Amino acid sequence: MNFKNILMIFVLSYLTWLALNWSVETDILITGAGISVVIGLLFCRNCTVLQTVRLTPKSFAYAIAYVFVFLWDLLKSNIDVAGRVLSPSLPINPGIVEVKTKLNSNIGKMLLANSITLTPGTLTVDIREDRMYIHWIDVSSTDIEEATKSIVKKFEKYLEVMYG
């Protein structure tokens, strides 16, 4: 068993427990800790996906910054898609583009794909090694480098520090 993985799952489970209960009563804290330990031990026996997570002050700072970058991009994308939908001419140019990623870890690629999908106007269709196929509501370029710069780079620089 990998102690680092168990500790990470414990901390994430416990923080989730505390956020959901929103209480600091002793019985709530003890119950949450017990459940979180059990979850950590049960689900991390052969847990390999978390081995690439970097637990450094720099990666923690990048994780916090990533949340704000993602939320800002989410807001901009929502406004953009709403404007397209409300426009009488419906200015869209949909298509699937291929983008490249420098991320090596599976969890980093998964978070990148989910971030792209959660952002209105883009949807991750497939992932193959260092390539992703994205359905884009307004394809401005089918060039891999241009599409990568427009869709992936804003998230990737943070995820690379956090997960490699």
Image (tube, rainbow, N blue to C red):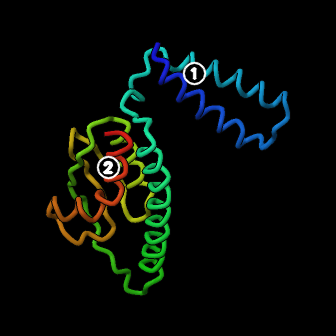
Using the rendered view, name the quadrant where residue 116 is placed. bottom left
> x, y percentage for residue 22?
78, 44
> Left or right of 66: which side holds 143?
left
User: In terms of depth relative to the viewer, which is nearer, 81 or 50?
Assistant: 50
Looking at marks 2 and 1 on the same chain, the residue that comes earlier in the sequence is marked by 1
Q: Which mark is residue 22?
A: none
Horizontal and vertical percent for residue 32?
73, 28
Is 159 located above or below residue 3 in the figure? below
| Front position in the image: 16 or 118 | 16
Q: Name the side, left or right, on which 96 lies relative to 83.
A: left
The residue under the point 49% across, 60% down is: 68
Q: Label 2 vs label 1: CA separation? A: 31 Å
Residue 40 badge? 1
Give the vertical position of 151 relative to 7 (above or below): below
Please state which of the two labelled residues, at mark 2 or mark 1, is closer to the viewer.
1
**Dot 1: element:** helix
- The type of residue carrying mark 1 is Gly
Q: Which of the 4 quarters of the picture holds residue 9? A: top right
Q: Residue placed at 18% from the left, 65% from the top?
A: 146
Quarter of the C terminus within the rendering:
top left
Residue holding disc 2: 125
Percent across and percent down for residue 61 are 46, 50
Q: Please rate how many residues cluster around mark 1, counting C-alpha atoms within 10 Å: few if below 14, some from 14 to 19, many from 20.
A: many
- Mark 2 crowdedness (10 Å alpha carbons): few <14, some 14-19, many ≥20: some
Circles 2, 1 touching at the beta carbon (< 8 Å): no
Residue at screen point 14% across, 63% down: 143
Instruction: Please give the name of the residue rendered at 35% of the width and 41% of the height, measured from the top-left corner.
Output: 108
Residue found farthest to the front: 57
**Residue 48's quadrant in the figure?**
top left
Amino acid bearing label 2: Val
Q: What is the secondary structure assignment of the residue under circle 2? A: strand
